[in-house]
Amino acid sequence: MSLILGGGISGLSAAFYVLKNAPKPNTSITLLESGKRLGGWVRSLQTPEGLIFEQGPRTIRPRGKPGANTLKLIEDLGLEDHVIPIQSNHATAQNRLIYVNNKLHKLPSSVWGLFKTLTPFSKPLIYAVIHDLRTKSVPKSDESLYDFTSRRFGQEIADYAISSMICGICAGDAKKISVNFLMSYLFEVEQKYGSVIKGIMKDRTKKPDVIEQSDLYRRAKLEKWSVWSVQGGLEGVVNALDEKLKDKVDIKMNTAATNLEFHDKGVKVTLNNNEQMEANHVISSLPAPKLGTLLHKQHPKLGNLLNTIEHVNVAVVNLAYENVPLKENAFGFLVPPKENLPILGVIFDSCCFPQNDWTILTVMMGGAWFDKYFTGKSKEEILDIACKYVHEILHMPRKPCGYIERVYPTVYIGTQE
């Protein structure tokens, strides 16, 4: 029996691939989900007005092996006719903003933008490229993403571009996140070729990796998709996986493992109802500290190591405004940590996927700085902070027509080992 821990998108996908690649048609698969719903961070809520609020991820990139594999999964699930793509020439793909010195600034979206001085940068970004080409590499095993960027491209790129981007990707602090964890490719080419730019250019001449190309992936390349989603929100992928698995995988809701004990013939699993089960294979999609707790009794050193992986809290607030259009047509904006604001950024959801006459925004707050700004704050206070900054920065009404707020307590960020 194959056992999968966790019913988020990773656990459900793992169950799908185990089922798809199983050597025998009657392979036994069990999935344990500790909560009352599947999907984990992927959650699309529909309001009484019919609006879609994404409380987790809302778009997926189609590039590289991960992008190709995901589009193949979408095809296998029969969702290809439900995909909503955003092409690379769309305003939300072209316009990415950062908020610095009380103003919104557009980041360059083309090579030509490198030759212009765009605030908040003090000189054209081509100088950052030249800095990388001229700077010798230093043999290292790892370093923070912030230090790596500062060394290769200069401090302004680290402060305004990379630090903001990391806030948007994982709500983390670029000064603490390992470059090997989040952007290992850039670190590897720098160490190998002496320069990030040189390494990228040389790698372009190599024969590309073989990627299983589905019809949907070929369409994405042909139409130059930037990102994509599905009708009704990304939770539609979760629902499709659930539908595909429900008759072939034993999905146990409100059930969690409390201990894993490995032996010669497999794994003995203790559950939260004190029952025990045997598994030949265990696949974990749990956060590292939760897995560490399950392993601690038999493997205390490994358990302790997993428990040291840092986590942060993120407050997510969805806001809706009727008949109040945004002045900016963009994907959204991010806030560099050096601005010392409680918000990480705001996504302009309705610019990406219009919802009639409604403006839908998602405010992300806290992250690596959650304790500094939000310890002890009530949901009402968190909502008020989100509305305050949306009003001040985007000039939207102080009170939205609708809202949903939620705090995500376990968004894990990278470590160096």
Image (tube, helix red, strand yellow):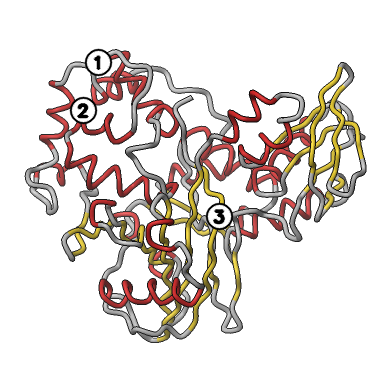
Kindly identify the amino acid type of the residue bearing the numbered disc 1.
Val
Q: Is residue 314 above or below residue 391?
A: above
Q: Nearer the viewer, mark 1 or mark 3?
A: 3
Q: Residues within 10 Å of mark 2 (few under 14, many from 20)?
A: some
Q: Position of residue 214 (x, y in %)?
A: 59, 39
Report the label total.
3
Q: Residue at x 52, y 43 (%)?
A: 412
* Res. 253 image quadrant: bottom right
Q: Residue at x 76, y 50 (%)?
A: 33
Q: Nearer the viewer, mark 3 or mark 2?
A: 3
Residue at mark 2: 151
Q: Residue at x 65, y 43 (%)?
A: 10
Q: Which mark is residue 138?
A: 1
Q: Position of residue 11 (x, y in %)?
A: 70, 43
Q: Position of residue 165 (x, y in %)?
A: 34, 47
Q: Is residue 289 left or right of residue 32?
A: left
